[in-house]
Image (cartoon, rainbow, N blue to C red):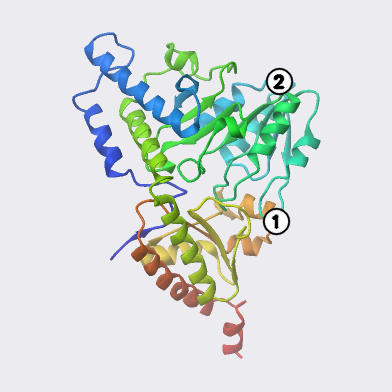
Amino acid sequence: MRRVYLDSNATTPVLPQVLDAMRPYYLEEFGNASSIHHHGQHARAAVERARESVARLLGCRAAEIVFTSGGTEADNLAIFGLAQPGDHIITSQIEHHAVLNAAKQMEKRGCAVSYLPVDSDARVDPDDVRDALRPNTKLISIMTANNETGVLEAVEEIGRIAAEADVYFHSDAVQAAGKVPLDVKAIGCDLLSISGHKFHGPQGTGALYVRRGTLLEAMLYGGNHERQRRAGTENLPAIVGLGQAAEIALRGFEDGSVERIRTMRDRFEQGILSRVDACGVNSGGAPRVPNTSNIYFDHIEGEAMVIALDLKGLAVSTGAACSSGAIEPSHVLTAMGLPSERARASIRFSLGKHNSEDDINLALLLVPETLARLRELSPTYPMASQSQI
């Protein structure tokens, strides 16, 4: 069976060039970057080259990059490293749980948190950010791109609001890195999180941009690694891979590969909308990253469709989360105002650099075919109801 992977917002395959760059650091160049001998010096040089590559991806100084174990740690370090009991935090209802659950934990520690609503396209109104400001507001945390819909937030405008109020601004850019150009100076943020495995780097590595002069309280205590901001021996092969993935991502904005993904995504959406009834693109009219499409298919259960497609060789996902054995509708889609039935019937398709036109052709064949079968079994689908009369 031929398998097609359209779930790149969950994780991406490591590109061959990234693996080739990492391989020597598992074998010959295995030193500890804190050691002063030959092996350690070579390791330190590799870490700093990767730091420079990530800095170029984000438009910042290399010294402003802190390597982490991924996006979750980067988000947590930004929030726990700045906020203190008595502070006020502003975030949104559609953030990744790495931010939402960190904010909830800060509430338990004595912080006040404002969870801003979004419009029907899952966009935060910058005026709501301004209106939520308080004298004790310490941090604003609004994502750059949403992981479920791909919608891009007005982070530059929010950055200006934060600067005017002299409030720290953090943005979770995990789903934006490698898909749209990022410039922390243009955004005006003090902190920004990325994760390597979302743009064809290795799992278990990420980075937090920390603007020069921003004082963070460390979450891990140990050695003086990462300028005393993140203790622990650097994950040398993964950091090298992250740096290589950053270089490939930068080239992608110039060599047409990002636009190729956008073209495939758009062709897929148009093909589905022309072949299938009672469906639509969630946030289809809003600015989005080029690889993401979130489509609702009325009269089905999304989880059933994910399983049925997987049995046919197509990997996709829903926006639903599983909690205590109960499938809850996506917090993002419900915040947009979708009824729970439609939120549960929404499927996320997300492309990567590994995908081809043939992958899209197969998806355009399998999705309508699978959907038709599921709807035949649905008591709410009009044709099914009529056939039973």
Q: Position of residue 267 (x, y in %)?
A: 47, 66
Q: Is 134 on the left or on the right of 338, as rendered? A: right
The structure residue drawn at horizontal position 40% and vertical position 73%, both measured from the top left corner, is 365
Q: Position of residue 354 (x, y in %)?
A: 34, 53
Q: Answer yes or no: do the residues labelled 2 and 1 have beta carbons within 8 Å?
A: no
The structure residue drawn at horizontal position 45% and vertical position 58%, both measured from the top left corner, is 316
Residue farthest to the front, as pictured: 254
Specify whether residue 144 is in view.
yes
Within 10 Å of the Cα at label 2, are there few (<14), some (14-19), or many (20+) other Cα atoms? few
The quadrant the N terminus occupies is bottom left
Type of residue at label 2?
A: Pro
Q: Is 188 on the left or on the right of 2, as rendered? A: right
Query: Which residue is label 1 attached to?
Result: 120
Q: Is 320 on the left or on the right of 8, as rendered? A: right
Type of residue at label 1?
A: Ser
The quadrant the C terminus occupies is bottom right
Count of marks overlaid on the render:
2
Viewer-proximal residue, 84 or 209?
Answer: 209
Viewer-proximal residue, 212 or 230?
Answer: 212
Q: Is residue 160 above or below residue 340?
A: above
Q: Is 74 on the left or on the right of 54, as rendered? A: right
Q: Is residue 352 above or below residue 301?
A: above
Q: Please, what secondary structure does the residue beneath circle 1 have?
A: loop
Q: Earlier in the sequence, mark 2 or mark 1?
A: 2
The structure residue drawn at horizontal position 44% and vertical position 30%, both measured from the top left corner, is 56
Q: Is residue 20 above or below residue 40?
A: below
Q: Position of residue 233 (x, y in %)?
A: 37, 19
Query: Which residue is label 2 attached to?
Result: 85
The quarter holding residue 388 reads bottom right
Q: Please, what secondary structure does the residue beneath circle 2 have?
A: loop
Viewer-proximal residue, 308 or 114?
Answer: 114
